[in-house]
Image: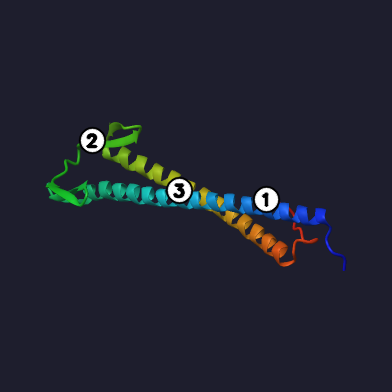
């Protein structure tokens, strides 16, 4: 069994350093994706709650008293005119007026878009996790064997 030459040790050490940097980058990307996932999940819940509330208004008795949330656990009692238009934000602080059925459809479409974005993001997260696992195993192998002759295929 021959001892590794100085250049083999340098290549191995350089490979370990590059893999560690890549592993750190993948972990940072995965953490950012997890944060995005949390935001999408919260947005989905908010859109679902809005759609269900609009649909619930249609099922309420005429002139039924409702509690309308204002935020910060503050509610106001009121009634909803079923024929009144709904104001829906379309981004950049712009709000448009539409009838209730249109608003429900917009919320339904947004939910579909959010669900697709969540699926795409989960796929990306899975791919990142796979890369992290491969790099971790390669680094473990390199460090256990001292790096000599144990290179696994690159990403």
Alpha carbons under labels 1 and 2: distance apart: 59 Å
Alpha carbons under labels 2 and 3: distance apart: 32 Å
Foreground tag (1 vs 2): 1
User: Horizontal and vertical percent for residue 11?
Assistant: 77, 52
- 69 with respect to 140 (left or right): left
Alpha carbons under labels 3 and 1: distance apart: 27 Å
Judging by the rendered image, the residue that carries numbered circle 2 is 85
Judging by the rendered image, the residue that carries numbered circle 1 is 18
Q: Which mark is residue 70?
A: none
First in sequence, mark 2 or 3: give its number: 3
Foreground tag (3 vs 1): 1
Residue at the image position 49 percent from the left and 49 percent from the top: 32
Residue 93 can be seen, yes or no: yes
- 22 with respect to 42 (left or right): right
Toward which corner of the image does residue 146 lie, by quadrant? Answer: bottom right
Q: Which mark is residue 36?
A: 3
Binning the other alpha carbons within 10 Å of mark 3 as few (below 14), some (14 to 19) or many (20 upward) gives some
User: Horizontal and vertical percent for residue 67?
Assistant: 16, 50
- Indicate the secondary structure of the residue bearing disc 3: helix
User: Horizontal and vertical percent for residue 137?
Assistant: 67, 63
Quick one: 65 or 83, which is closer to the camera?
Answer: 65
First in sequence, mark 1 or 2: give its number: 1
Binning the other alpha carbons within 10 Å of mark 2 as few (below 14), some (14 to 19) or many (20 upward) gives some
Residue at the image position 16 percent from the left and 43 percent from the top: 80
Residue at the image position 27 percent from the left and 48 percent from the top: 55
- 103 with respect to 75 (left or right): right
Binning the other alpha carbons within 10 Å of mark 1 as few (below 14), some (14 to 19) or many (20 upward) gives few
User: Horizontal and vertical percent for residue 90?
Assistant: 35, 34
- Indicate the secondary structure of the residue bearing disc 1: helix
């Amino acid at each position: 069994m021959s001892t590794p030459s100085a250049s083999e040790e340098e290549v191995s050490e350089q490979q370990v350093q590059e893999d560690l940097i890549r592993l750190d980058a993948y972990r940072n990307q995965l953490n950012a994706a997890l944060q995005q996932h949390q935001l999408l999940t919260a947005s989905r819940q908010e859109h679902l709650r809005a759609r269900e509330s609009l649909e619930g208004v249609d099922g309420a008795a005429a002139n039924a008293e409702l509690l309308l949330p204002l935020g910060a656990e503050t509610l106001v009692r009121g009634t909803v005119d079923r024929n009144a238009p709904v104001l829906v934000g379309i981004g950049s602080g712009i709000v448009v007026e539409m009838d209730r059925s249109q608003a429900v459809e917009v919320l339904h479409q947004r939910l579909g878009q959010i669900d697709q974005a969540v699926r795409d993001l989960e796929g990306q997260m899975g791919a990142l996790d796979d890369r992290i696992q491969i790099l971790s195993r390669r680094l473990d192998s390199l460090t256990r064997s001292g790096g000599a002759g144990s290179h696994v295929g690159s990403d």
